[in-house]
Amino acid sequence: MKPLRRRLLAMVVLSLMTSCTSSASSFTPPTVLALAKPIRLSGRPFAFGAAAHSIWVITNGASRQSQLWRVPAHSDHVLGRPESLPLHASIWTVMVGDGRMLWIAAGRNLGKSGSKDRGVLVEFDPSRRKVVSRTPIPSRPTAIAVIRHDVWIGIEGTKLGRGKLIRVDASTGQVMHTVRGLDFPDVIAPGPTGLWVSG
């Protein structure tokens, strides 16, 4: 076999191997969709989440009243008027959707001597546009995830090793378990055999 034919044969084999590998893989590169125009909201955005085929954004205006805005999927505009939320949004606000409900963890430092930080976990039903439940939690939530019908919330500690990971039963809103001794749990994700927390 001549050298040129060997090179062509090697290219054909490599092409076949690449096509087989790509067909066996389930990975699909993400597609970036450009918006026709920027979406303008009143107030400062603090948290984002997806539920009920929409993107939801929490903003905090000058009145310190939190507002929840809805942007439908594949849209470049806000739908309807924002909903007022029973919380004071701040940098300590995280939100996640489980496809049906929105879970919002928010907290604020009162800044008073001897006072404790206050936080709340809010369950919001997008279809009814209504707050379903409120669960008291420590302040300064840094991460949130819904895994197997449980809501996991990362709480930053005031000192190293004082952070927490809280497990809340999504069906009852009760705090079921607390993991202590973390530094800054800012990412929570499910794994094949357990829960992954980065901090």
Image (cartoon, rainbow, N blue to C red):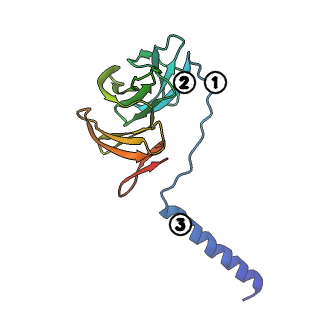
Q: Name the quadrant of the N terminus.
A: bottom right
Q: Is residue 107 left or right of residue 13?
A: left
183 or 199: nearer the viewer: 183
Q: Residue 190: x percent and y percent?
A: 39, 50
| Between 157 and 76, the one nearer to me in the picture | 157
What is the spatial separation of the Cα atoms under label 2 and label 1, in whole angstroms? Answer: 17 Å
Rendered view: 75 above or below 33 = above
> In terms of sequence position, does the residue under pointer 2 or pointer 1 come before the other?
1
Mark 2, residue position: 45
Q: Using the numbered discs, state the Cα–Cα distance from disc 3 to disc 1 in whole angstroms.
A: 39 Å
Q: Residue at x 47, y 36 (%)?
A: 158
Q: Give the image location of residue 122, x and y in percent.
A: 35, 26
Q: Give the mark nearer the N terminus: 2 vs 3.
A: 3
Residue at 72% over, 79% down: 7
Q: Secondary structure at mark 1?
A: loop
Q: Which mark is residue 132?
A: none
Please identify the residue farthest to the left as the structure is shown. 172
Task: Tell me which residue sits at (67%, 74%) in the image.
Answer: 11
Q: Is residue 197 left or right of residue 175?
A: right
Of the image marks 3 and 1, the number of the one nearer the N terminus: 3
Amino acid of disc 2: Pro
Q: Mark 2 or mark 3, which is nearer to you?
A: 2
Residue 21 marker: 3
Q: Secondary structure at mark 2?
A: strand
Mark pair 2, 3: CA separation:
42 Å
Q: Residues within 10 Å of mark 1 (few under 14, many from 20)?
A: few
Q: Residue at x 37, y 57 (%)?
A: 192
Q: Is residue 184 above or below residue 112?
A: below
Residue that badge 1 annotates: 37
Residue 153 x, y percent position in the rendering: 38, 38
